[in-house]
Image (cartoon, grey):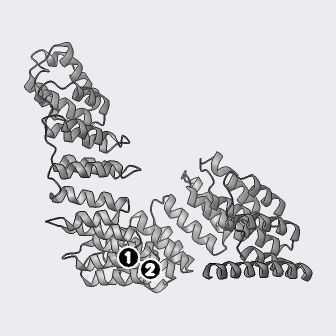
């Protein structure tokens, strides 16, 4: 911006410049010119415009300085709302609540937008405490009966699985819309209570695609896959067009049921209705076909994607691994890396799983050790489990045992059992006994480790050892019976 543009500077001309939402560099130039040339900064509308521009450009620090030094009278409700909304979109999760507290100490009155912005920020925090405090302020200010605010509160409680609180807000509402109903359905569904969610769902005076998506997603998350597909077809019968979320959930249900015909029909529905084939939908199709055993169909979908992302690759890599096609999974993984795509933790899990089922020890080891150094992925217990399984299946029992002993995460029962199964495959009783000791420490009263050890001894023909283990199992059973009798008596 040239200096001569401020020779005949007026508050009106500056406001006009700021109303065009200039970039941050020009906003700072205007601000500097205002200060150095003693332009009419006292005009509140000009200050408001400057603050608005700073917030719009996501430069909260300069906007906050102006806001905190606002001349009398205090900022308007609109300006408070702008500031609170700006902070609600950042990582400063407690700041909107702090600003609300400051606002209540002034003459500015919070409105439905104020409370909505603050409640939304509370939903992104680790604790419900701030949300409950704001709920109290809402009640005190008589805004609880506002549809906009009440919906925000229901959503807040749904996020924290506070179903009873969400239901109470819903019950106290004098007016409800489809969002109100859907939020309550979501609260029950996320909490695993799909029966209650279904009751509320069918009580709804009107259902839209989002309502159906929430309900179908609830069934999928609780592994009620058949019911999820039944609701999907009910939705289509109600002449509601399926959105992306519904289609992804329905395809997930087909994948878990191994229902190729249903999944293929949904694929046809997508094509016939000209639905945008997003990355999520294409990934769900690949996953469905792979889990239904139709890798050929999965490849067809994959090859039709013009610009593949990590999700698409990961889905097909995992599908190939499930079917023991480890070499193809590795080839696809290298193709993904050649396209400069960075794998995620699920991609690595798929690769390790493929290596494990195909005996690709060198490739699996390289992938495991590269995941943190090259791609910044910290191994989780699932990654350790796959790698230990890979080494165990290949007969590297000592190395696998050493990794389990040295890993930074406490090994769980599943990991020890995988290693014990490898001992049985390779008929190694010495390592088997050591592993059993660790399993018994994790769960002393469990029979599973004893059964596995007994099977290991039996496979080696060590019948005396089998008898000893079964005697121990019998004593455990007797002790349990004695405890039960004592409690009854």
Mark 2–mark 1 CB contact (< 8 Å): yes
Q: Quadrant of residue 463?
A: bottom right
Residue 129 image point, x, y percent: 35, 50
Residue 296 image point, x, y percent: 55, 77
Residue 395 seen by the camera: yes
- Could you tell me which secondary element the residue under label 1 belongs to? helix
Q: Is residue 262 left or right of residue 180?
A: right
Q: Is residue 260 left or right of residue 39?
A: right
Q: Which is more toward the observer, 160 or 249?
A: 160
Q: Which is more toward the observer, 483 or 224?
A: 483
Q: Mark 2 — residue?
A: 224
Q: Which is more toward the observer, 442 or 462?
A: 442
- Look at 60% across and 48% down and name the residue there: 375
| Relative vertical location of residue 474 with respect to residue 102 in this rendering, above or below | below
Q: Is residue 159 left or right of residue 346?
A: left
Q: Quadrant of the C terminus?
A: bottom right
């Amino acid at each position: 911006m040239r200096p001569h543009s401020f020779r005949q500077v007026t508050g009106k001309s500056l406001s006009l410049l700021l109303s065009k939402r200039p970039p941050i560099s020009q906003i700072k130039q205007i601000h500097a010119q205002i200060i150095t040339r003693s332009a009419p900064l006292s005009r509140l509308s000009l200050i408001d415009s400057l603050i608005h521009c700073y917030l719009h450009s996501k430069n909260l620090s300069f906007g906050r300085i102006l806001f905190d030094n606002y001349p009398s009278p205090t900022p308007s409700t609109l300006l408070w709302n702008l500031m609170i909304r700006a902070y609600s979109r950042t990582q400063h999760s407690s700041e909107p609540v702090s600003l609300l507290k400051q606002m209540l100490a002034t003459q500015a009155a919070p409105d439905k937008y104020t409370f909505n912005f603050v409640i939304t920020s509370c939903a992104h925090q680790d604790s419900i405490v701030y949300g409950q405090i704001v709920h109290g302020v809402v009640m005190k200010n008589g805004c609880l009966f506002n549809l906009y605010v009440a919906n925000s509160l229901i959503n807040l409680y749904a996020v924290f699985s506070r179903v009873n609180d969400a239901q109470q807000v819903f019950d106290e509402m004098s007016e409800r819309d489809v969002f109100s109903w859907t939020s309550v359905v979501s609260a029950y569904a996320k909490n695993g209570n799909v029966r209650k969610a279904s009751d509320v769902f069918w009580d709804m005076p009107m259902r839209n695609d989002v309502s159906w998506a929430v309900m179908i997603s609830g069934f999928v998350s609780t592994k009620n896959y058949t019911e999820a597909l039944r609701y999907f077809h009910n939705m289509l019968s109600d002449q509601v067009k399926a959105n992306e979320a519904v289609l992804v959930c329905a395809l997930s249900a087909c994948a878990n049921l191994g229902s190729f015909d249903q999944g293929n029909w949904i694929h046809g529905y997508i094509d016939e209705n000209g639905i945008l084939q997003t990355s999520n939908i294409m990934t769900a199709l690949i996953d469905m076909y792979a889990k239904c055993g139709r890798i050929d169909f999965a490849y067809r979908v994959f090859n039709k994607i013009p610009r593949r992302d990590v999700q698409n690759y990961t889905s097909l890599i995992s599908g190939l691994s499930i079917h023991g096609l480890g070499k193809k999974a590795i080839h696809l993984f290298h193709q993904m890396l050649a396209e400069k795509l960075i794998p995620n933790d699920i991609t690595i899990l798929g690769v390790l799983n493929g290596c494990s089922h195909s005996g690709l020890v060198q490739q699996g080891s390289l992938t495991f050790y590269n995941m943190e150094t090259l791609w910044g992925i910290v191994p989780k217990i699932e990654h350790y489990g796959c790698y230990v399984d890979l080494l165990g299946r290949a007969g590297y029992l000592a190395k696998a045992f050493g990794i389990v002993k040295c890993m930074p995460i406490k090994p769980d029962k599943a990991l020890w059992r995988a290693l014990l199964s490898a001992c049985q495959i390779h008929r190694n009783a010495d390592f088997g006994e050591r592993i059993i000791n660790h399993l018994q420490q994790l769960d002393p009263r469990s029979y599973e480790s004893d059964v596995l050890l007994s099977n290991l001894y039996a496979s080696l023909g060590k019948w005396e050892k089998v008898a000893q283990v079964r005697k121990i199992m019998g004593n455990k059973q007797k002790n349990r019976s004695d405890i039960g009798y004592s409690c009854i008596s």
